[in-house]
Amino acid sequence: MCGIIGYTGNKNALPILIDGLEKLEYRGYDSAGVAVVSGGKIRFKKRKGRIDVLKDSVRSDNLTGTCGIGHTRWATHGEPSDQNSHPHLSLDQRIALVHNGIIENYAKLKDQLKRLGHRFLSDTDTEVLVHLIDHHYSGDMIAAVNQALLEAEGSYAICVLDQNSPDRIICAKKDSPLIIGEGNGEMFIASDIPALLPYTRKVYFLEDGETAIVEKSGAQIFDRYGKRIFRKAYTVDWDISAAEKAGYPHFMLKEIHEGAPALKRTIFPRLKSGRIVFPDLDIKELLCSAQKIFIIACGTAYHAGLTAKYTWEREFKIPIEVDLASEFRYRDPYLSKNTLVILLSQSGETADTLASLRHAKAAGAKTLAITNVVGSSLARLADNVIFTLAGPEISVAASKSYLTQVICLALMLISSSFTGQKLTDAVNFLTALPDLAQLVIKEQDQIKKLAHLYHSKKDIYFIGRGIDHAIALEGALKLKELSYIHADAYAAGELKHGPIALIEDSSLVIALATYPQLFDKIAGNIMETRTRGAKTWVITTKSGYKRFADMSDHITVIEDAPDWAIPILAVIPMQYFAYYACIERGFDVDKPRNLAKSVTVE
Ligand code: M6R
């Protein structure tokens, strides 16, 4: 979704702003803009389209200045256009503002402001904010910003530039992320960490309701009542190379290749003397004292959560419900102090997941966040937190984060309920797992050929039973988001209840068949599709090879593994398939259409 960057210091702001915007590209956007204070005036440029378009248009202009703000916009209110791009300015062009989020009562505010003589140039909700600030300004910009934010309903992260304070940026946030980075005699503001990595590791996370005055000498943070807050800096330990392509053509390919090291980072620090330990967290007490557990997430994280339903319910013997965050928050589920709500999110900033966290907390449930981003809103707001240590994931399509989410859920299970030989076996398997994943990662050539063979299909169907259905859902999501091929995943037993009507000569059916107890059942389903003319690609384990070899046009074999680990090995071929299908069809892997990495609005 939208990305924000800000700089104040002694250097020329423009290259830093453009570089920051490029680092934020992965969040998804359709237009971009910058504003700097130059010669006592605000000068700005904003353009529909890629950052390269903006770059071309600023090249001819001399936008020099040592303080500025930039923005990548993902359209919500008002189509992508130059006019609707940020920054938005007061009519006298004295104040410029960039915004991430949605001002829900913008229509009402716009009417009021129009009656007061304000004239609007865009269709956005954001423009209302800058006019509101202008309206309240009577010499004290921070007071004007605070007053405007009091009247605005919705979510926001904003940066405000005022030509009368040429070295200063005022920023504020509610329900959208904003980070302040401290350099040497220079300060930065960004929506997320990767944009700051080339400049500083020292960051301050702004909390909801807070406002900050950022000047090159430092930042002053204030709470919603205007009281100064002294916040400790956090030192980011992500390596800058982790946020670069490092010779790979796309972040997605790099991140698939980073799957094995990401697993090592997530597993090994938690292995202690043949046991699994989460420092500072009594995970057994948390899981075993719950009478009901919800796992709440969106997209790929939801699919990772689904895998736990199959393994946890069997062990814990309590109901485990996995729900989409966008559904959970509105369906008024029964929650009590004996309910544990687990929020799963790579970014830790997904609006629906965050809203679900707030909902669960308000209902008195215990909460646990599993996220990849230290300092993210989810990590800061949940009662407990476990970090997946995947490293930055830049590609919009999630890959290594899925692996680390699945393994975190498995580690929690093993740590809380496995004992004796079962525990020893699990720990031994965990130790070997990154290398087993690496073996699958190395086998990309076969999948590349399959993508070449099938990339022009209009529809592709994924089937599986039990945990394989959960994995199939992720395969279908990956394929549709990257290649735009229509893909659906079905519980294989459901085929005869409707979906099999879709199967025709040469349909491609991708069957997940990794669960030995259900080999016969899925074999029957595969045959049902073959007899109707389908081509079948079966992803199975070594012990399934014989069973499925004769009923597959293509077969991919992964190592035998316990069900809590199988999604990790089985998903990799499907990630490659989506990646190569996207390349074959000539689309941009890292910037799939209409999508954003971090969905920070509802
Ligand atoms: O940051 P989150 O894990 O909360 O994001 C959830 C989904 O938006 C995300 O997994 C999305 O489905 C991915 N683009 C899938 O590849």
Image: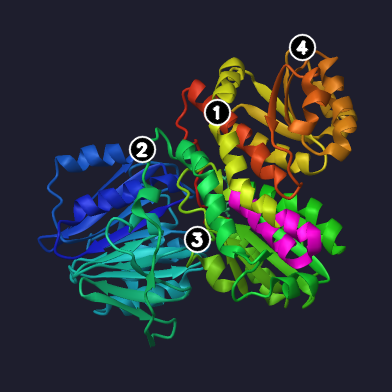
Q: Picture coordinates of residue 162 (x, y %)?
A: 23, 67
Return the residue at label 3: 373
Residue 403 lies within the magenta run: yes
User: Do callouts 1 and 2 mark residues in contact (Cβ within 8 Å)?
Assistant: no
Q: Nearer the viewer, mark 4 or mark 1?
A: 1
Q: Amino acid at mark 2?
A: Gly
Q: Compared with residue 341, is residue 511 higher up or lower down, i.e. above or below?
A: above
Q: Nearer the viewer, mark 3 or mark 2?
A: 3
Bounds of the magenta segment? 402-426
Give the camera-side residue of 351 and 509.
509
Q: Is residue 345 visible?
A: yes
User: Position of 508 compared to 438: left or right?
Assistant: right
| Of the two numbered discs 1 and 2 in the rendering, the one whose residue sits closer to the viewer | 1
Q: Which residue corresponds to mark 4?
A: 505
Which residue is identified by label 2? 49
- Could you tell me if residue 333 is visible in this image? no
Q: Which type of secondary structure does the marked residue at label 3 adopt?
A: loop
The kind of residue tagged 1 is Gln
- Compared with 355, 466 (above or below) is above
Q: Report the Cα–Cα distance between label 3 and label 2.
A: 28 Å
Report the amino acid beneath label 3. Val
Instruction: Give the mark nearest the N terminus, 4 or 1.
Output: 1
Crowd band around label 1 with a 10 angstrom C-alpha radius: few (<14), some (14–19), many (20+): some
Q: Nearer the viewer, residue 583 or 514?
A: 514
Q: Earlier in the sequence, mark 3 or mark 4?
A: 3
Question: Residue 526 lies in magenta, yes or no?
Answer: no
Q: CA distance from mark 4 to mark 2?
A: 41 Å
Say above or below: 217 vs 303: below
Q: Amino acid at mark 4?
A: Asp
The answer to which of marks 3 and 2 sits earlier in the sequence is 2
Of all residues, the one furthest to the bottom in this rendering is 227
